[in-house]
Amino acid sequence: MAGNIGYSNFNATTPVHASVTATPSPVNAVPASFNIITATPLSGVVTVGTGGDYTTLTKFDGLFKAIGDNGLSGDLTVKVITNTAEDGNQSLNQWAEYCGSGYTVTIVPTDATVRTLTGSLSGMGMFWNICFQSHH
């Protein structure tokens, strides 16, 4: 694919690497804009509760805020390791998705122990559209 990438140290006329040309391809003669993402999208497994990655789901420093700020780069499994007191300050809204789409958030207890998420009724709207799974 020679000729498709232009690269230069200081200008667009002198390539730094010999196998890269300084002339943009005719199809992309004007470079498109791009954004640099400074967030670290979440994926894999995180824990919520005392001693976990996040102490709560819905407080200002909780998991839902982290998802809202950083987005997802894969499916996320949330293991609740202790009971939590939630204030409902941060709801789980549509998140940004990187390197794909259609990611899910699954919230499960770490074991067969019942976990209790408490909070005021007015703040409990943050649990709409979330699937909680029991441990089998």
Image: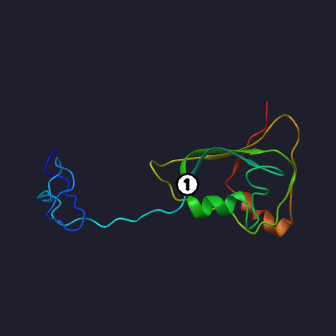
Front position in the image: 13 or 72 = 13
By what rule are the colours in the image chosen? rainbow
Residue 1 shows up from this direction: yes
* Residue at image coords 56%, 57%: 71
Residue found at the far top of this picture: 136
Horizontal and vertical percent position of residue 41: 55, 54
Dot 1: element = loop
Horizontal and vertical percent position of residue 29: 15, 63
Dividing the picture into quadrants, the one containing residue 127 is bottom right
Label 1 Cα crowd, 10 Å radius (few <14 / some 14-19 / many 20+): many
Amino acid type indicated by mark 1: Pro
* Residue at image coords 76%, 65%: 59
- Please say if 54 is above or below 113: below
- Is 95 left, or right, of 79 in this rendering? left
Horizontal and vertical percent position of residue 135: 79, 34
Quarter occupied by the N terminus? top left
**How many labels sit on residues?**
1
Dividing the picture into quadrants, the one containing residue 79 is top right
Front position in the image: 29 or 19 = 19
Quarter occupied by the C terminus? top right
Residue 94 shows up from this direction: no
Dividing the picture into quadrants, the one containing residue 94 is bottom right
Q: Which residue is mark 1?
A: 41
* Residue at image coords 18%, 57%: 15
- Is 5 left, or right, of 59 in this rendering? left
Front position in the image: 129 or 98 = 98
Horizontal and vertical percent position of residue 17: 21, 51
